Amino acid sequence: MTIAEYLAQCLTPYGWKQLPVFPGSVRDARLMRQSQGALLEIDHRPARRELWLWIIGKDWDKRCIGFEYEDKLQFVLQAIVTMQDKLKIEDYFTAYFEFQKVGGKVAIIAWEQFPEPAGTQDTGFNQEAAVAQAQAAHAQIASGGGGDPDPVVFPGQRVAKLSDYVAIMKRMQTGDMMGALGAYGLDMMGWGSVAAAWGGKLGADPTLNAKFTKMLMG
C-alpha cells in the first residue's frame, strides 16, 4: 500500500476528501476537510517524507504546520484527527505546540517558503472554486435534487454502490476495521485500491461527495 492510499484509508472516515494530484507535481496526495471556521488541507511530499497541514481561514489567510513523520506517520495522523475540529487560524500556535508532543520534527512553514519548482505546480485546481462547488452540491442534495441518492459507481465490483462504501466507513468508525473489510471480501491490500478509487471519485464529483457526506452522517 502506498502512503497516498494509507492517508486516504485513515482519514476518509473522518470527513477528509481526497483531491486530484496533477501529473508532474511533487505531491502524491492531498486531502481536504471543512472544519469549524477553517478549511484544512493535508499535502504529502514523499521525497521529503513530510506532511504539510494547511489551516486556511477567511480571505484565504493560510498557516502551515509541517511534519517530518519518519516512523511516526500513524501518530501524526492520530493527532491531526484528534485536533481537526479545533484547528483555526487564531489557534495556530496552540496547535503547533500540541503537535510537538507527537515527537519528530514539527515546523511552522510560511506558505511562500517552499514554492514548487517551475513546471510542477498543480495548475488548474482552484481551491476557492472547489469549495463553492461543494457548497452548491450540498444545497442541491438538501433540496432533494442530485438524482439517485445511492448510485452504483463501480458496477460489478465488491464495493459498487455508495451505500456499500458508507457501510464500510461506518463500521470502521466503530473500530472494527477487519470486520468491515471482511464483510466485502477485502484484505488490507484490496482495501487500499478500493479506498483510492472511491477517494478519486469523491474528489472529482462534488455531488457524489455531498451524497456521501449526507449518508455517512445519517
Image (tube, rainbow, N blue to C red):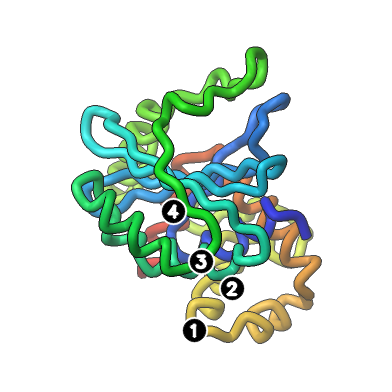
Image position, residue 155 (x, y; %): 73, 55
Residue found at x 32% / y 57% = 95
> Which amino acid lies under the numbered mark 1 shown in the image of this protein?
Thr
Q: Label 3: few (<14), some or many (≥20) within 10 Å?
A: few
Q: Which circle's residue, 4 or 2, is located before the other in the chain?
A: 2
**Mark 4 secondary-structure assignment:** helix
In the image, residue 140 sits, relative to residue 116, either above or below, namely: below
Q: In which quarter of the image is the N terminus?
A: bottom right
Residue found at x 43% / y 24% = 112
Residue under label 4: 211
Q: Which circle's residue, 1 or 3, is located before the other in the chain?
A: 3
Q: Which circle's residue, 1 or 2, is located before the other in the chain?
A: 2
> Which amino acid lies under the numbered mark 2 shown in the image of this protein?
Ile
Q: Which circle's residue, 1 or 4, is located before the other in the chain?
A: 1
Residue found at x 66% / y 42% = 48
Tag nearer the camera, 4 or 3: 3
Please say if the residues under marks 1 and 4 sit with CB atoms less than 8 Å apart.
Answer: no
The alpha-carbon separation of the residues under discs 1 and 4 comes to 21 Å
Please say if the residues under marks 4 and 2 sit with CB atoms less than 8 Å apart.
Answer: no
**Mark 2 secondary-structure assignment:** helix
In the image, residue 30 sits, relative to residue 111, either above or below, namely: below
* 181 on left or right of 37: right
* 142 on left or right of 104: left
Residue under label 2: 168
In the image, residue 30 sits, relative to residue 171, either above or below, namely: above
Q: Which circle's residue, 2 or 3, is located before the other in the chain?
A: 3
Image position, residue 157 (x, y; %): 77, 61
* 13 on left or right of 60: right
